[in-house]
Amino acid sequence: DTYLGELIVFEDSTTIGSPSAWNWNFGDGEIENGPVVSHVYSAPGLYEVTLQVVTENGCMDTVVESIEVAELFQLPNVLTPNNDGINDQLEVYSSFADRIEIDIYNRWGHTVWAGSGSKLLFYGRTREGIELSSGTYYYRMLASYLNSVQREYTGHIEVIR
């Protein structure tokens, strides 16, 4: 299994005979030839990868394996902005979303920070740059995709100082 945008290397591990041809079908309409090939999937889903091997004598064998390609969505929920180089900022990104919009709220429902783009960094400060106190904050995030689909995510972020 893999994530969108990751290069996957497929390698034939035939142990019997002398293969002379390798035909790979990645299940997404793309094909490749050779004992070692690579591929990047452009959409999440479950794909059947087929390898057909032909030996010098014309004998054929086929193997089919399923591979799940998932969207890599990163949104950590703990932030420790103390300048030690560990968890000082919250990085939000997706391997598939074209645009991400996020609003972070305090416990009274007031927006303390908002951002939009393809990769966002939150440093535990308000929009005006004021440090947020330790505590639990809530987010609402909207991920937009090239196919006009939008997904909403909600959750919490713990700021520890």
Image (cartoon, rainbow, N blue to C red):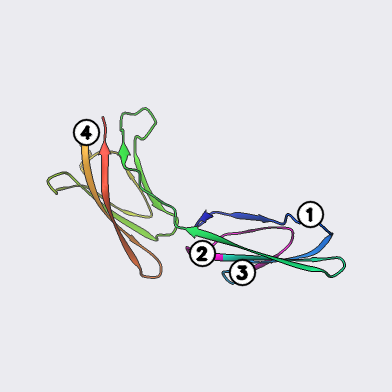
Give percent across and percent down for residue 159.
26, 36
Given this view, does label 2 or label 4 mark the residue nearer the observer? Answer: 2
Q: How far apart are labels 1 and 2 at the CA level?
A: 28 Å
Q: How far apart are labels 2 and 4 at the CA level?
A: 41 Å
**Magenta region:** 30-47
Q: Residue at x 60, y 55 (%)?
A: 8
Amino acid type, label 2: Leu
Give percent across and percent down for residue 110.
14, 48
Given this view, does label 3 or label 2 mark the residue nearer the observer? Answer: 2
Amino acid type, label 1: Thr
Given this view, does label 3 or label 1 mark the residue nearer the observer? Answer: 1
Q: Magenta stretch containing residue 60, yes or no?
A: no
In the foreground, 149 or 128:
149
Instruction: From the image, tell me which residue sits under label 4.
Output: 134
In the foreground, 5 or 57:
57
- Sequence-wise, the earlier of marks 1 and 4 is 1
- Sequence-wise, the earlier of marks 4 and 3 is 3
Farthest-out residue, left: 108
Instruction: From the image, tell me which residue sits under label 1.
Output: 15
Instruction: From the image, tell me which residue sits under label 2.
Output: 46
- Sequence-wise, the earlier of marks 2 and 4 is 2
Q: Magenta stretch containing residue 42, yes or no?
A: yes
Q: Are marks 1 and 2 in contact (CB under 8 Å)?
A: no
Q: Is residue 35 above or below residue 54?
A: above
Mark 4 surroundings within 10 Å by alpha-carbon count, few (fewer than 14), some (14 through 19), many (20 or more): some
Residue 117 circle label: none
Q: Secondary structure at mark 4?
A: loop
Farthest-out residue, right: 57
Instruction: From the image, tell me which residue sits under label 3.
Output: 30
Q: Secondary structure at mark 1?
A: loop
Image label count: 4
